[in-house]
Amino acid sequence: MTDQNLDLSDALVHLGRGPRTPGRAVNLPITQGSTMLFDTLAEFEAAREARYQPETLYYGRYGNPASFELEKTIATLEGGAGCISVSAGLTAVTLALMGAAKAGDHVLVADTVYTPTRNFCDTVLQRYGVEVSYFDPMQDFAPHFRTNTTVVMFEAPGSGTFEVPDIPAIAALARAQGAISIIDGTWATPVFCQPLKLGVDVVVHSGSKYIGGHADSMIGFIVCNEATYAPMRKMVLAYGDKAGSQDVFLSMRGLRTLEMRMKAAEAAGYEIASFLQDQPQITRLLHPGFADCPGHDFWRRDFTGAAGLFSVVTKPCSDLQLHAFVDALELFGVGVSWGGYESLVLPVAPLRTAKPWDDPGRVLRFNVGFENIDSLKADLARALPLLD
Ligand SMILES: *Cc1c(COP(=O)(O)O)cnc(C)c1O
């Protein structure tokens, strides 16, 4: 089953394993291996020559049957020409940027990207002679293009603040200016949005979030359209990074239940967001599925659902109150990352330079997990008065 028009549920269950795996088990096994053996020197030389080509068995670092099946599955889900699996989501971001930009280029980066993405741009990229500037993805950014702009990097929705930009418009403007567009699509996963079909050139994912789905794996994916795939694969493989064998296995396993987990996360997210919206301590909801979220209409047009990750803004409060509230929560863990089965809470300080974030309240990001929804509400109800 490789049909790009395959039903999503069927694709998630059947892709990447064929009617019979070699061992007859339902799932492909974890594939460990460095050296691969060849019958003749001529066969080896042919593999070495083709090592940057997809699905070429040459040496473990370039991929193995399990990673190739995962890459093909994710490429099919996204409607892409191909996918490269790497060791983490941030690696997917940084290697996609390194693969697309060179010294002397200018890279336009959305003000709302994941903070470590911004950090990479401001440190490594600039150090390697790439100019970086930030734009507000919710405004027309045509004036920000320079003659040497070759890459536009953005995220939908924005990290921590969840405003949804006009994906097809950004992709079209980048293309018209001769630049490659790269989107971080981690929040939506291919279940809720397929940006390549909206004109974006490259989609990156942290598979450590919903795709793995159980907070036990770290992996990243770079999914490319026809024009960008071959050069990107060659560049990324040249860096020598690779996804771990166990993480490849866990990603494939996660994909099998991704659609139902996304739907459950969406429903739980709506419940908790609606509950929080009604609380006197909460002044604003930052959730793409609610009408007052900037870009809500773009979300309705381009996405088929909302993840269980969103933020709220509290009334202005002291650090002491913020700590008291977060520490009083029993079912919401404190920590980075998200997309696992467990609920999390994290204060975020939106770092913005193109358009300063000026709400005086505290931004709290919630990952709603699969606990009993009434238990989650009761936990919040007990702790919220600590913000008064
Ligand atoms: C977590 C995250 C990343 C980085 O992924 P890791 O797998 O943790 O390296 C990149 N982009 C977004 C939007 C993320 O949330």
Image (cartoon, helix red, strand yellow):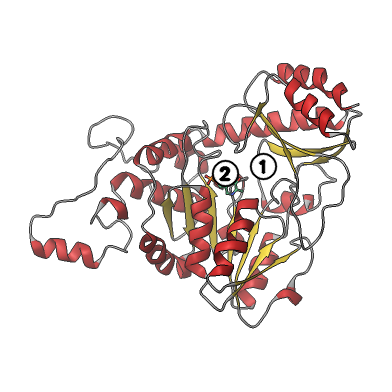
Residue closest to the eye, 10 or 341: 341
**Residue 4 visible within the image:** no
Labels 2 & 1 near each other (Cβ < 8 A):
yes
* Amino acid type, mark 1: Gly
Residue closest to the eye, 227 or 231: 231
Give the answer, above or below, for where 116 lies relative to 226: above
**Disc 2 Cβ-to-ligand 1 distance below 8 Å:** no
User: In x, y percent, where is residue 67?
Assistant: 35, 47
Kindly identify which numbered label has been placed on residue 191.
2
Q: Using a 10 Å C-alpha cutoff, classify the residue at mark 1 as few (fewer than 14 neighbours), some (14 to 19) or many (20 or more).
A: some
**Residue 342 visible within the image:** yes
Image quadrant occupied by the C terminus = top right
User: In x, y percent, where is residue 70?
Assistant: 39, 46
Q: Can you tell which quarter of the image residue 47 is in?
A: bottom left
* In this picture, residue 52 sits left or right of residue 344: left
* In this picture, residue 327 sits left or right of residue 122: right
Q: Residue at x 32, y 44 (%)?
A: 66
* In this picture, residue 85 sits left or right of residue 259: left
Residue closest to the eye, 3 or 115: 115
- Where does label 1 land, which residue? 305
* Amino acid type, mark 2: Val
- Marked residue nearer the N-terminal end (2 or 1): 2
Element under label 2? helix
